[in-house]
Image: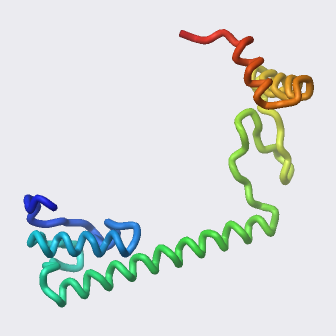
């Protein structure tokens, strides 16, 4: 678009092209300078015209506000779930959720379980994660 080789930018809802209002206004400005049209399901806009630029600016502001509201609702839902004790996040590799509420188990695969137990045993013996890493680096053969 900056080279004035784009005639129109099309999208289902063009105000979603940018994640924030500042980026959206840069796009509108550049489109206005290069005579590039912007079109979506609602209409066709020429950013060089005041009314179209105003409408595109409002669409961008509304889109940014909508993202803020959605993010706030999602975070509220996560907090409510955590308050009820129902929030389950991804566990580190080697662990799985059990059947009981909040129950965390070592992975049922014996090779994975052995590796996890070895990490904890070496940490208890060596006293630091770096020493455990160095031990594993020296013990485990590299695959070529």
Q: Which percent across, then down, holds residue 62?
A: 39, 82
Q: Which percent across, then down, holds residue 55?
A: 25, 86
| The N terminus lies in quadrant | bottom left
Judge whether 118 appears above or below 49 on screen: above
Q: Which percent across, then down, holds residue 139?
A: 74, 11
- Side (left or right) of 23 relative to 136: left
Q: Which percent across, then down, holds residue 40?
A: 22, 72
Q: Quadrant of residue 91?
A: top right
- Side (left or right) of 21 relative to 94: left
- Side (left or right) of 135 relative to 33: right
Question: Which residue is rendered at x = 59% and y = 75% of the image?
Answer: 72
Front-most of residues 34 and 64: 34
Q: Quadrant of residue 130?
A: top right
Question: Which residue is rendered at x = 80% and y = 28% of the image?
Answer: 116
Front-most of residues 15 and 103: 15
Please identify the residue farthest to the bottom as the structure is shown: 51
């Amino acid at each position: 678009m900056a080279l004035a080789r784009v005639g129109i930018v099309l999208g289902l809802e063009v105000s979603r092209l940018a994640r924030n209002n500042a980026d959206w206004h840069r796009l509108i400005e550049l489109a206005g300078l290069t005579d590039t049209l912007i079109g979506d399901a609602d209409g066709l806009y020429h950013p060089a015209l005041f009314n179209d630029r105003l409408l595109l600016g409002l669409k961008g502001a509304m889109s940014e506000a909508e993202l803020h509201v959605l993010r706030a609702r999602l975070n509220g839902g996560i907090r409510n779930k955590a308050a009820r004790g129902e929030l389950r996040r991804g566990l580190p590799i080697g662990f799985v959720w059990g059947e009981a509420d909040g129950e965390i188990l070592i992975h049922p695969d014996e090779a994975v379980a052995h590796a996890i137990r070895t990490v904890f045993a070496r940490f208890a013996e060596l006293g630091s994660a770096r020493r455990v890493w160095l031990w594993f680096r020296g013990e485990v053969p590299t695959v070529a």
